[in-house]
Image (cartoon, rainbow, N blue to C red):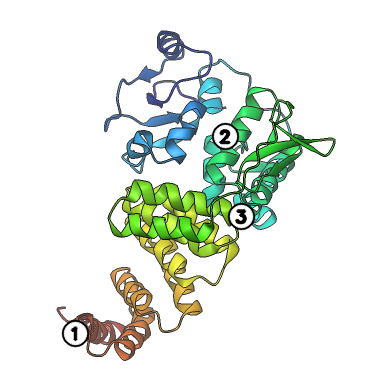
């Protein structure tokens, strides 16, 4: 169990069943310094389940979360409650699956697993997962492939959790509008089992929705464009380009984490989508995850060998990492692609520097 004694804690969102005063009392009893706002002195940030909707939809709370310093520990609401002595320790079940194994067996990317853990949909312990976590992760993957948005799946998972159940314990389906519903005796119902009224009106034309989304994006109205791309994705959940465009407007609107999820969704449907790999590379580099960025740029270039932007970014990053023997052929590759471009001049200088560095020399660039 996580020891929070003497920790400087900030809680993002409300804790289920506790008023702010009760939370302060519980923290004082546990020797925890509860902070009223996020500041450099905060060492632990607890993200509550109530914050899920605002975080995953890219509202204000996401801006707060992205300001959390890299060294700060992020914990879930369940971990917070256990650390404060408000909930018993984790169930003594067998946990043998690593994150890498869970990714491979479920088909979900590690970033999805991060969010699922943060909102207690799955519950790892010391980096290991249970078979129940695998079943839940597989259900998330299935629902997303069926057309449900990741935020909608998390919302359903939290609703089920509040009723004492998990995603792997209830039969779920996805409507053609991307809504997650329960299946009972072959009938589609609400999560509580209540039958839905038959109000399945014909949806809009996906082409018309996309046209409006593209116009809004061109006008810089990213909020409207995001709403329309999201609607288009519900109408045609298998189109990877819609998910990619949705990620682009989310990124332009400052919703970086949600954009990464949308790009991953595009790759779920089209693994050979170089622009999506490239965008993930840029996002990883911006977040300081440079090795991930290298991997993403390499994938983009492997899929599209004439992708000059991917070659340039990869070469520059390898150069900055001091991997000169790897950077040199990529610089040469970029120069062959864009010999007359503005960036080619810098590329030639960088390539020359790589040749010197490989020989143990150096040159100012």
- Secondary structure type for disc 2: helix
- Secondary structure type for disc 1: helix
Q: Is 44 or 174 nearer to us in this picture?
A: 174
User: What number is the disc on residue 100?
Assistant: 3
Q: Position of residue 92 (x, y in %)?
A: 72, 29
Q: Residue at x 74, y 29 (%)?
A: 195
Q: Residues within 10 Å of mark 3 (few under 14, many from 20)?
A: few
- Cα separation, mark 2 vs mark 1, equals 51 Å
Nearer the N terminus, badge 2 or badge 1?
2
- Cα separation, mark 3 vs mark 1, equals 41 Å
Q: Answer yes or no: do the residues labelled 2 and 3 have beta carbons within 8 Å?
A: no
Q: Residue at x 38, y 60 (%)?
A: 214
Residue 15 at least partly seen: yes
Nearer the N terminus, badge 3 or badge 1?
3
Location of residue 345 with respect to 267 vertically, above or below: below
Identify the image quadrant of the N terminus: top right
Q: Position of residue 319 (x, y in %)?
A: 30, 74
Location of residue 232 with respect to 11 vertically, above or below: below
Nearer the N terminus, badge 2 or badge 3?
3
Q: Position of residue 154 (x, y in %)?
A: 57, 38
Q: Residues within 10 Å of mark 1 (few under 14, many from 20)?
A: few
Q: Which tag is nearer the camera, tag 3 or tag 1?
A: 1
In the figure, residue 168 lies in which quadrant? top right
**Which residue corresponds to mark 1?**
345
- Secondary structure type for disc 3: helix
Q: Residues within 10 Å of mark 2 (few under 14, many from 20)?
A: many
**Which residue corresponds to mark 2?**
155
């Amino acid at each position: 169990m996580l020891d929070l004694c003497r920790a400087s804690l900030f809680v993002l969102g409300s804790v289920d069943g506790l008023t702010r005063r009760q939370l302060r009392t519980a923290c004082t009893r546990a020797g925890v310094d509860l902070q009223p706002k996020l500041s450099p002195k905060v060492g632990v940030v607890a993200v509550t389940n109530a914050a899920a909707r605002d975080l995953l939809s890219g509202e204000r709370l996401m801006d707060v979360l992205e300001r959390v310093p890299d060294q700060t520990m992020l914990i879930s609401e369940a971990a917070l409650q256990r650390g404060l002595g408000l909930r018993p320790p984790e169930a003594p079940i067998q946990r043998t699956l690593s994150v890498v194994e869970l990714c491979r067996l479920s088909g979900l990317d590690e970033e999805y697993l991060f969010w699922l853990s943060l909102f207690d949909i799955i519950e790892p312990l010391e980096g290991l997962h249970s078979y129940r976590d695998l079943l839940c992760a597989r259900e998330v993957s299935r629902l997303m492939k069926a057309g449900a948005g990741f935020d909608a799946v998390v919302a359903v998972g939290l609703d089920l959790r509040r009723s004492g159940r998990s995603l792997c314990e209830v039969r779920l389906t996805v409507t053609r509008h991307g809504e997650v519903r329960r299946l009972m005796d072959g009938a589609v119902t609400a999560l509580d089992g209540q039958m839905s009224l038959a109000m399945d009106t014909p949806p809009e034309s996906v082409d018309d929705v996309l046209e409006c989304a593209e116009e809004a994006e061109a006008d810089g109205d990213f909020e409207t464009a995001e709403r329309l791309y999201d609607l288009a994705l519900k109408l045609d959940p298998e189109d990877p380009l819609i998910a990619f465009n949705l990620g682009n407007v989310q990124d332009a609107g400052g919703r970086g984490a949600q954009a990464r999820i949308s790009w991953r969704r595009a790759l779920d449907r089209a693994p050979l989508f170089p622009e999506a790999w490239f965008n993930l590379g840029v996002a990883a580099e911006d977040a300081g995850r440079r090795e991930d960025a290298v991997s993403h740029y390499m994938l983009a270039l492997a899929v599209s060998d004439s992708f000059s932007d991917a070659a340039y970014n990869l070469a520059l990053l390898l150069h900055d990492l001091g991997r000169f023997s790897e950077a040199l052929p990529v610089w040469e590759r970029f120069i062959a692609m864009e010999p007359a471009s503005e960036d080619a001049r810098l590329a030639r200088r960088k390539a020359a520097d790589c040749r010197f560095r490989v020989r143990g020399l150096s040159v100012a660039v």
